[in-house]
Amino acid sequence: MKTLKIENDLRRLITSPYSVEMEEIIKYPQPRELETGTSVVAIGDLHGNAIKFLYFLIKYKLVECSGIGYLNLYIAYMDNNIKNFVTFLKKYVRVNSSSHKPLLVLIGDTLADRGMNDYMTLKVYELLKDSGFEYIIIFSNHDQEFIVNFHKKLLSRQAKPRTFILGQPKLFARSMINMHQSIMRGEISDREVESLVRTVYIPNLKLVYKHRMAYSHLKSEMVIFTHAPVDIPFLQKCRKFICRQHSTRDFDRDYMMVENFSSIEEMIDAINANFSVESFVKMHNNFDFQFNERIFEQAPLLKLVWNKTIMEPSFQMRHKITFIHGHIGQQVVNSKHIINLDSHFGKEHHEKYPFPVAMIKELVVCGSVIDSGYFARSQ
């Protein structure tokens, strides 16, 4: 019902007699200048869509690409023509040569989602990595599905087709399934895919990312990025769980008292330092993809990537922190401390059709904020 309501809202916007600004992923994005001092650029859920990835990289001038180059990449993407996509990526796309490059934070769902082919996304990662561009991928539920299949060798050429382990319908992992079909047809090698996964993907994964520069519209002093909604007490549970799993000496400390930013940073650093993709494979072996609150209590890290319930901040320092996540669809969050970056732009049929600018969610974090449509209007 919620999805139907969203689609009806979109239909009303598109058919409105009033002027509605639309954005189309098929069209070359109009580049915009980042403000001086921009230190972090965050992009919401990619939905496994490599062309959406490039769209925002071009829009914020993180990479350079001509209009004809973008159109050729879009056509290759929609045709699932990985040979042409890689050729055009090498020919037309260059990482911006500016000496100052902000950190790129991807909110998740970059692989094993509704997009066309994960190999294309991995090649975009490779382009960034080879150019020395720093990026962080926030680990998500779709990342867990990708990692489980990768570690169980279900993406190799020897694997039987259609033996994927998924927690959602196969449509929701189309990009991974199409990549495996490309491997089976001999268009790409499983060795190259494994090399890409181990060099440009896994090393850049984090469960949580924190940033101390102010988000000016909200007067915050810290921004915390996750894929699914969280709050500080829940992150404390995650720290205790992950430190116990790795027998870290201080896992029994009481982390319910958060007195300053240093203690929050220490907590998040401990979560990421003890994080491994293998731990999510192990949790899958224990729980499959059957999740409920009882399982979330036993393994809070699963809730960290699968939770869809908004956690309204209630701790002492809540007014100083902004939580930024995706995962929950177009849902509007009525909280000045929480921002949802998930949108349907570039998702499923919005790979082809226009999308209202007012419903596109994207964010740049710096001394001040550059944003589009939705946030500009809502603040």
Image (cartoon, rainbow, N blue to C red):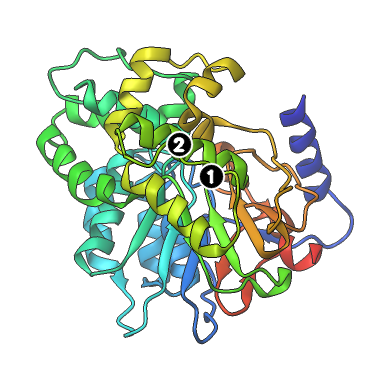
Quadrant where the image shows the C terminus = bottom right
Q: Is residue 325 above or below residue 129?
A: above
Residue indicated by mark 2: 240
Q: Residue at x 23, y 31 (%)?
A: 182
Q: Residue 143 lies in what quarter of the image?
A: top left
Q: Amino acid at mark 1?
A: Tyr
Dot 2: within a 10 Å radius of its alpha carbon, few (fewer than 14), some, or many (20 or more) residues? many
- Depth order, front residue of 242/253: 253
- Depth order, front residue of 137/65: 137
45 horizontally vs 79: left or right: right
**How far from the left and from the top, in percent, is residue 111?**
38, 39
Disc 2 element: helix
Q: Residue at x 46, y 75 (%)?
A: 39
Disc 1 element: loop
Quadrant where the image shows the N terminus = top right
Q: Is residue 3 above or below residue 199?
A: above
Q: Amino acid at mark 2?
A: Lys
Dot 1: within a 10 Å radius of its alpha carbon, few (fewer than 14), some, or many (20 or more) residues? some
Q: Residue 110 lies in what quarter of the image?
A: top left
Q: Could you say which disc has been placed on residue 318 in the image?
A: none
**How far from the left and from the top, in percent, is residue 351?**
53, 45
- Depth order, front residue of 154/206: 206
Residue indicated by mark 1: 255
Whole-angstrom CA distance, mark 1 to mark 2, is: 8 Å
1 and 2 marks in contact (CB < 8 Å): yes
Q: Residue at x 58, y 15 (%)?
A: 294
Please report whichever mark, 1 or 2, sits nearer to the chain's N-terminal start.
Answer: 2
**How far from the left and from the top, in percent, is residue 5?**
79, 33
